[in-house]
Amino acid sequence: MLTEKIIVLRFSAMGDVAMVASVLKEFSEQNPSVEIIMVSREAFKPFFDGIDNLTFHAIQPKIIHKGIDGLYKLYQELRKFKPTAIADLHDNLRSRAISTFFRLSGIKIKRIDKGRAEKKALTRSVNKIFKPLRQTVERYADVFRELGFQINLSHKLIPKVQQVPSKAKGLFSDSVKKKIGITPFAQHIYKIYPLNKMEVVIAELSKLGYELFIFGGGKEQEIAEKWSQFIPNTHNLIGNFNLKEELAIISNLDLMLSMDSSGMHMASLVGVPVVSVWGPTHPFAGFLGYGQSEANCVQIDHPSRPNSIYGNKPCLCGVETCMDLIEPQSIVNKIKENLNA
């Protein structure tokens, strides 16, 4: 019997919402009597498919839920669920407004501690405190703990192979070749490995006989299409599949090569290991994919790293950026090491 209802707020960004899904999977398994109402953008709904006792409620911040009047309307929609608690995993203006409405009606609220001061200490150039911070997924779990629930995160990849979409079955006809997903792009340009060097990586992986699948957003379609045309065994998936289908495809891969971006978190969600490439950001900030190994992070040691939490600031390593200093062969070697283990 469902005894409590928690409204969970996390509206963006894509990778953060995918991390929330990883936490809610384990929370749901460990707290089967709790009903979860997940509030996020409609596009992210596939992340939460298959989680028991979870209802997805879409926020439409540009249309229905715009401005304070729109947020009050969202509050009225959510109030109908009769929640017993609110878990604010976002801590932005919108989530704070929704939380405030509920607090005024006597509902218990707990909010994520983002650890802003320690993140500032990790990224500053003077008196940098270089140490691993609490993982973001644990910060999410802490909110539920503060609400009085027990949750122990396993931090393990749990493979969840899904059926390959019918229009992608031809790409999986060769059952012998190892299959690698590649997400070479990111929201912020400073997190992207130079595309000319990524091309070298893709060409080398192709020579080694791997089957390669390029993922990304609409604006990168042209680049991925070019690679797929002149590099053998390389397939452009951008613009051809929706998010639900992409997750199903990723679940059938042997490995994902990703930046510090949503591709890493999508792979984590379906239990696929990731080799990730890091520039001005760093796994120490707490955003490594759930269950992923820090040993699979490709990065250079430099006293200026990290200088950014979200990758929205340029590298401070000098003439050559920390991304430029990573040799393509080091990425290829890390992938070979994983697939030949």
Image (cartoon, rainbow, N blue to C red):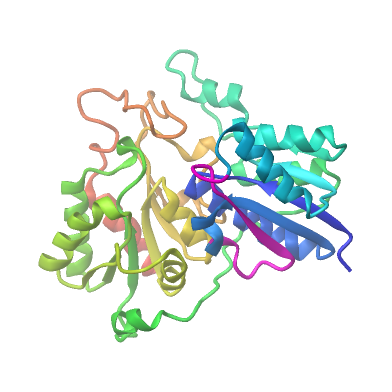
Q: Nearer the viewer, residue 162 or 93?
A: 93
Image quadrant where residue 111 sits: top right
Q: Is residue 142 magenta?
A: no
Q: For residue 203, what is the image quadrant?
A: bottom left
In the rendered image of this protein, does residue 284 appear above or below residue 197? above
Q: Residue at x 51, y 51 (%)?
A: 289
Give residue 115's position: percent from left, percent from top.
62, 29
Please indicate whether residue 3 sits to the left or right of residue 212 in the image.
right
Find out whether residue 55 is within the magenta segment.
yes
Residue plotted at (48% across, 65% down): 272
Q: Quadrant of the N terminus?
A: bottom right
Q: Nearer the viewer, residue 43 or 308?
A: 43
In the image, is 144 to the left or to the right of 50? right
Residue 28 or 178: which is nearer the viewer?
A: 28
Q: From the top left corner, tell me how far across and down residue 60 is, in percent.
A: 54, 48
Residue 19, position in %: x, y?
57, 51
The segment highlighted magenta reads: 47-64
Q: Residue at x 49, y 57 (%)?
A: 43
